Image (cartoon, coloured by chain):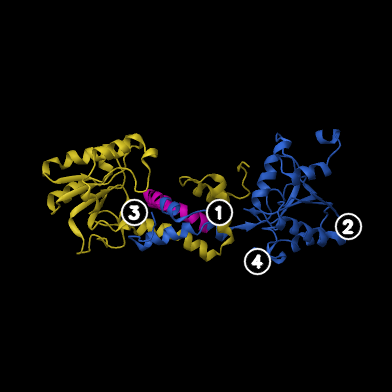
Chain colours: A yellow, B blue
Amino acid sequence: MSIQQFSSSLLENAVNEFAKLPGIGRKTSLRLVLHLLKQSEHEVEVFGNAFIQLRKEIIYCKECHNISDTEVCRICSNPGRDHETVCVVENIKDVMSIENTQQFRGVYHVLGGIISPMDGIGPSDLEIESLILRVKTGNVKEIILALSTTMEGDTTNFFIFRKLAPFNIKTTTIARGIAIGDELEYADEVTLGRSILNRVEFTNSFK
Amino acid sequence: MSIQQFSSSLLENAVNEFAKLPGIGRKTSLRLVLHLLKQSEHEVEVFGNAFIQLRKEIIYCKECHNISDTEVCRICSNPGRDHETVCVVENIKDVMSIENTQQFRGVYHVLGGIISPMDGIGPSDLEIESLILRVKTGNVKEIILALSTTMEGDTTNFFIFRKLAPFNIKTTTIARGIAIGDELEYADEVTLGRSILNRVEFTNSFK
């Protein structure tokens, strides 16, 4: 079924709007719009306004640039967190993932992306300057780089690492290795190689 | 990654709204919301309002109940169409599919669903009464039932067939059989069986 001829331009508009979202094709879009049409007028208003309001009233924490309801987010304003250890992540999803592990008591710095010349994203589009400022003016002892292991992630890591060099600050990256429960046989060579190079002392691994 | 702790209730709201749509989980939802956050305020307003406006201003054609911009849709108001042949379909997507074949010159009647007791949809929730009224008052010569071949579709077909019985009107259903290009070997038995029962004369099939 190719969807070319719509019986209504309002319908066509709505379908086009959904189809702009990543991973949503025109067929899925039509299905979603028809679903919305079955909802009450009030429900659809709540639906549409949720995004408009979010976009309009969104606050980014002025410390870590995570999405927040307040000027300083819950994590940054928590005195129980270790403000000397800053974990640098690409986006808010990564903050959630790390928070779910309950293994990190420090604070975050959300870059809002990674350096990707292909997508036209340079260092100035990211919260890198503010990270340097945080290091310069704050009491940061360690920066943990927790970016993805893609070429873009490595580029960003290296860029930040160079920027931090003058400050004589401890800079680490999260450990890469074989996932717990995975068999060596099926691991890719790069990961396995790195897990051997970065081996840890046996007792240490149970800390 | 389980997404439980959101750093903002506005964000959580927006994620919940997307996740209400069929086939959209919470991870996908978060991805879509973060995508919207990268758009301009104006773009997100256009996005949200497209659905609100559609729901508010939607018009269903008073003849065929298809979604329309005008009181009577483009198809029903077209004098070149055969108004004596009415094709009954489940929803607007089916109208589009049939229109795309360019094989049908009649008009439609959109039921808005099919009888499905499991989902609490009875005959009174569908545009069946209006179909009967159309037959009663109009100049309809043939009703083509083009519903899906599920149990619900068959139930609806039968219900409409019974309702139409007093009017002594020609009632047909679309042909079911092996799709063009498909091999018999891989066809399911019911379809193959029906395609043999409903065989057509050889010359006829090239009409």
Mark 2 and mark 1: Cα distance apart in space? 38 Å
The crowding category of the residue bearing disc 2, from other C-alpha atoms within 10 Å (few below 14, some 14 to 19, many at least 20), is few
- Mark 1 or mark 3, which is nearer to you? 3
Horizontal and vertical percent position of residue B35: 40, 49
Q: Which kind of residue does numbered mark 3 sit on?
A: Ser
Q: Are marks 2 and 1 in contact (CB under 8 Å)?
A: no
In the figure, is residue A199 to the left or right of B183? Answer: left
Q: In the rendered image, which quarter is residue B176 located in? A: top right
Q: Say which chain tag 1 marks.
A: A
Magenta residues span B32-52
Residue A163 within the segment the image draws in magenta: no
Mark 2: secondary structure: loop
Mark in front: 3 vs 2: 3
Looking at the image, residue A92 sits to the left or right of residue B52; the answer is left
Kindly identify which residue carries mark 3: A97
Q: Which mark is residue A33?
A: 1
Residues indicated by labels 3 and 4 sit on the same polypeptide chain:
no
Q: Is residue A122 visible?
A: no
What crowding class fits label 3: few (fewer than 14 Cα within 10 Å), some (14-19), or many (20 or more)? some
Amino acid type assigned to the residue bearing label 1 in the image: Val
Q: Residue at x 72, y 36 (%)?
A: B185
Which three-letter amino acid code belongs to the residue tagged 4? Gly
Of residues A116 and B135, which is closer to you in this image? A116
| Image coords of residue B119 (percent x, y) | 64, 63
As measured in the structure, the alpha-carbon distance from the residue carrying label 3 to the one carrying label 2 is 66 Å
The local secondary structure at tag 4 comes to loop
Q: Are marks 1 and 4 on the same chain?
A: no
Which structural element holds mark 3? Answer: helix
Nearer the camera: disc 1 or disc 4: 4
Circles 1 and 4 in contact, beta carbons < 8 Å: no
